[in-house]
Image (tube, helix red, strand yellow):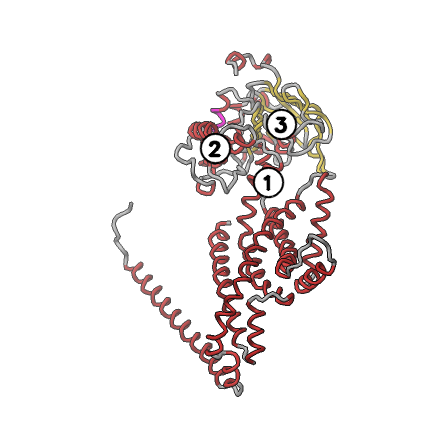
Amino acid sequence: MSADAARAPAAAAGTPVLEIRAVTKAFGERQVLGGIDLTVSEHRAVALIGASGSGKSTLLRCIDLLEEIDDGDVFLDGETITDPAVDPVAVRRRLGLVFQAYNLFPHLTALQNVVLGERRAHSFGRQEADERGRALLARFGLEGREDDRPDRLSGGQQQRVAIARAFAGRPRALLLDEVTSALDPELVGEVLEAVRDLKAAGMTMVIATHEMSFAREVADEVAFLHEGRILESGPPEQVLGAPRKPETQRFLRRLSHI
Amino acid sequence: MSEPAVISDRRLERETAKRRQARRGQAIAAISTLVVLGGLTALVLTSPGWPTVRETFFSWSVFKDSFPEVLDAFWLDVKLFVAVEAAVLVVGLGIALLRTSRAAALFPLRLLAVVWVDLFRGVPVVLLVYLIGFGVPALYLQGLPTDPVVLGGIALGLCYSAYNAEVYRAGIRSIHRGQRDAALAVGLSEGQAMRHVILPQAVRRVAPPLLNDFISLQKDVALISILGPQEAFRVAQIVQGATFNYTPLIAAALLYLAVTVPLARLVERMGGPEGAAR
């Protein structure tokens, strides 16, 4: 990762890593994504905000090919990944996804959770994978918890293991799906700290979140989803500070009342 | 951590009361056991037929004479049980995996798996033992086994693999979808996700019902006696026929219990803490 690109001015920021073009997705009769366009350039973080059910999770799952899109295209490093001929396994090895409910493997220790993908999907040797895994866990403040099963860890610790797991495959982009929504309030900070760390390291990210102050701090761009469409997007200070659309204004007003 | 044991009066009071309640509970349990068991024993012992029953079912001398013979025959049951169970665990898993797979190329095998389960689970075991034990040798086909023990084992294996397959399948389906998603998200293929993430959890979860089927199979091994092999039940019957005394059957029953009861305790221990954790 070049340091120059990280410092490049926002508008002229590096090459696009993810390009989402006119993506639609329906579950049965229900249209969940109604034509999404979004570009995420290298080293940039895009925050997706919007009410529950606005399509944030579905969009992330579509990008990671856990759901099949109905129409449009998603490009990763300029290649389409949503063509039926593309091997989804190869694509997922270049992306990382962190789930709202952590989804750690309960039968494996923290370290085994982190190295499973490295060993089976990226063919690292056991020793190298373990070394990298330990280093990653230490990086996210989990030194000494390597051999604990998930049920011995707090929610915040579990989510940090999940972040380490997603990051372990050296993804081109990291997709974070409301990673703090399932946490007790006092545990939110430690997980956000981990995301901040990744951002500082230049990770390209798409972050679905309800934490507006966090979005403002970490994101280079905020996109407001409403009923499966991006109604408004731009720099955080503009979308969050001076929203143009009435729907965005209403959404933010409701949040500030909670 | 806190100050060393300053026990309040209130707590002492509470503990005394709890001890009193526990003692009372034990006393009630002891008395009711005595009443129920004593009553049943008295009922049996005072029944008009008891002297005859004692002689024909619980004759110590017949027991002593027949036990070694029945025990000897019981090893056949144990050997057959172990062999069939091992095969059934593997075949059942294979069928379950076929039924849950989605690969287009496997369609014919998937169809076969469905038929296998429907057929062999839907037919009484006795009937399967009869059909295979007497039907296969009647074909006079080269290479097919004719040993009644092997044929009986195959019949039991067909039936129990169908049951086991459904237990495995239920286990696989019970693993939350998020586990598969997470496995795919770290870059595993569908097959790897099954092998490294879903199956290990599923098998752990269904270990108690699988063991339950073990116990059932261990008893059903006696069914091969209808094909002729001299296993425990068969031998007990032979001795019974010769002595006009049913005690050998009691001996056989005790031998089956000697295996099934420990297995049952094992099932409970496996189901306990693990089940509670979920």
Which chain is mark 1 on?
A: B
As helix, strand or loop, the secondary structure at mark 1 comes to helix
Q: Which of the 4 image quarters holds residue A237? A: top right
Front-most of B246 and A220?
B246
Instruction: Return the chain for callout 3.
Output: A
Q: Position of residue A170 (x, y in %)?
A: 53, 24
Look at mark 2 in the image and give the residue it sits on.
A160
> Up-down: is A10 above or below B30?
above
- Mark carried by residue A90: 3
Front disc: 1 or 2: 1
Q: Which residue type does callout 3 highlight?
A: Ala
Q: Residue at x 65, y 25 (%)?
A: A245
The nearer-to-camera label among 2 and 3 is 3
Answer with the quarter of the image where residue A8 lies. top right
Magenta stretch in the rendered image: A192-197
Q: In this orientation, which residue lies closer to the viewer: B1 or A105?
A: A105
Residue identified by numbered label 1? B194
Callout 1–callout 3 Cβ contact below 8 Å: no
Q: CA distance from mark 1 to mark 2?
A: 24 Å
What secondary structure is marked by label 3? helix
Badge 2: chain ID? A
Asked if residue A208 lies left or right of residue B8, the reply is right
Whether residue A239 is visible, yes or no, is yes
Kindly report the distance in space between the C-alpha atoms of the residues bearing marks 1 and 3.
17 Å
